[in-house]
Structures are given as C-alpha cells and as structure tokens.
C-alpha cells in the first residue's frame, strides 16, 4: 500500500484543485458561448422572417397591381422576379439552417452545462471535506458528462474561443 506524507497529499490536493478550477473555467466559457450562439440564432431567425415579410409584401403588391391593371406601382413584371428570387433564397436559407432548432439545441446544451458548472462549484466548496479518491471520481464523472453534452450538441468553431 502506498503511504503518502502529508506534504505529498497537500501537493496532490492543490494540483487537483487547480485542475478542477481550470475545468470549471472551461465549462463556464463553453456555457457562455452556447448561450451567445443561441441568442444570435434567434436574432438571425427574426431578421430572416422580417425580410421574408417585406419580400412577400413587395411581391404580392406587385402581382396584385399587375393582375388588376391598376398601374399604381411603376414596376414591370420583370422586376417582380428580384424579390421573388430573394424570397426563394431566404426560404432555402431558413430551410437549410433551421435557426429555431439550432437556437433550442444551443440553449439546451448551455442549460445542461450550467448544471455541470454548479456541480463543479459545489465540489470546490466541499473540497476539503472529501477524500482524494472521491474528488477524483466526481471530477471524472463531471468531465465525462461535459464531454457527452458537448459531443451531442452543435460543434463550436474556433473563432468563438478567441
């Protein structure tokens, strides 16, 4: 059986505490990034929806003007293709990106990471009460949980970590 001196145990505890603080900082940073990305995707969705409403209005009023031969709008039918093409582009963009779903997934991952963050916080608060093996087991469990959350969520680009 390995017997450690009190100095060795103290050094191991401090190294473990340092590692847990570092992992807590990483979880906090990733959580903040995921909340930011969720907000950004919601804003993008609102912008795209607003643009679509404007384009629908332009297209509909132009078609209505031409169909009723009112000649209220000085546009020719060929100019109606521009908002129609833009509207098609925004529809495809919405369909391909599915911003509401991505925002929900990011928010959900951030919420799960916030629970992990709270567990890291409580581990640090109770650090001196637990044995080294209990602390290591809890740290490993939290590390695995964080990995599962991040691997099942949307991938974060490197630019977010700058």
Image (cartoon, grey):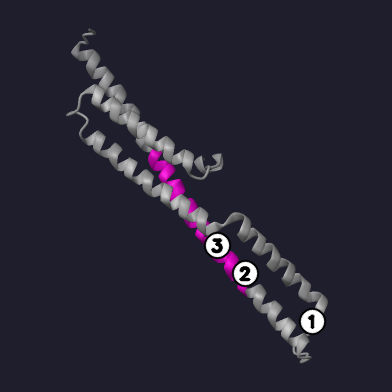
Q: How far is disc 2 from disc 1 in space, using C-alphas?
A: 20 Å
**Residue at image location 63% in from the left, 70% down from the top:** 52
Assign a secondary structure to mark 3: helix
Judge from the rendering whether residue 18 lies leftward or rightward of residue 65; answer left or right.
Answer: left
The correct choice, above or below, for 125 with respect to 36 in the image is above
> Where 139 sits versus 150, above or below?
above
- Taking the magenta stretch, the answer to whether it contains residue 101 is no
- Callout 2: helix, strand or loop? helix
Quadrant of res 45: bottom right
**Cβ atoms at labels 2 and 3 below 8 Å apart:** no
Q: Is residue 157 left or right of residue 125?
A: right
Q: Nearer the viewer, residue 144 or 18?
A: 144
Question: Which is more toward the observer, 133 or 71?
Answer: 133
Q: Which residue does the numbered mark 1 point to in the structure image?
A: 75
**First in sequence: mark 3 vs mark 1:** 3
Q: Residue at x 23, y 19 (%)?
A: 10
Quarter of the image with the N terminus is top left
Q: Circle 2 is placed at which residue position?
A: 51
Q: Which residue is mark 3?
A: 45
Of callouts 2 and 1, the N-terminal one: 2
Q: Position of residue 15 (x, y in %)?
A: 31, 22
> How far apart, in angstroms, are the residues tagged by discs 2 and 3?
10 Å
**Rendered position, 45 above or below 155:** below
Q: In the picture provided, is 108 more to the left or to the right than 73?
A: left
Residue at the (48%, 44%) spot, across then down? 153
Q: Position of residue 65 (x, y in %)?
A: 74, 87
First to last magenta residue range: 27-53
On the image, the x and y values in percent for residue 116 come to 33, 41
Q: Is residue 43 magenta?
A: yes
């Amino acid at each position: 059986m390995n017997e450690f001196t009190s100095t060795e145990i103290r050094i191991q505890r401090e190294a473990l505490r340092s590692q847990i603080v570092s992992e807590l900082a990483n979880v906090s940073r990733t959580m903040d990034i995921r909340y930011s990305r969720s907000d950004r995707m919601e804003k993008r969705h609102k912008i795209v929806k607003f643009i679509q409403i404007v384009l629908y209005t332009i297209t509909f009023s132009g078609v209505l003007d031409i169909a009723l031969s009112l000649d209220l709008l000085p546009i020719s039918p060929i100019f109606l293709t521009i908002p129609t093409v833009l509207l098609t582009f925004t529809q495809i963009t919405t369909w391909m990106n599915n911003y509401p779903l991505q925002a929900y997934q990011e928010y959900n991952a951030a919420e799960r990471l916030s629970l992990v963050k709270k567990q890291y916080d409580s581990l640090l608060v109770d650090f001196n009460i637990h044995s080294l093996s209990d602390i290591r087991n809890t740290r490993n469990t939290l590390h695995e949980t964080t990995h599962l959350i991040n691997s099942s969520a949307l991938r974060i680009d490197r630019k977010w970590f700058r």
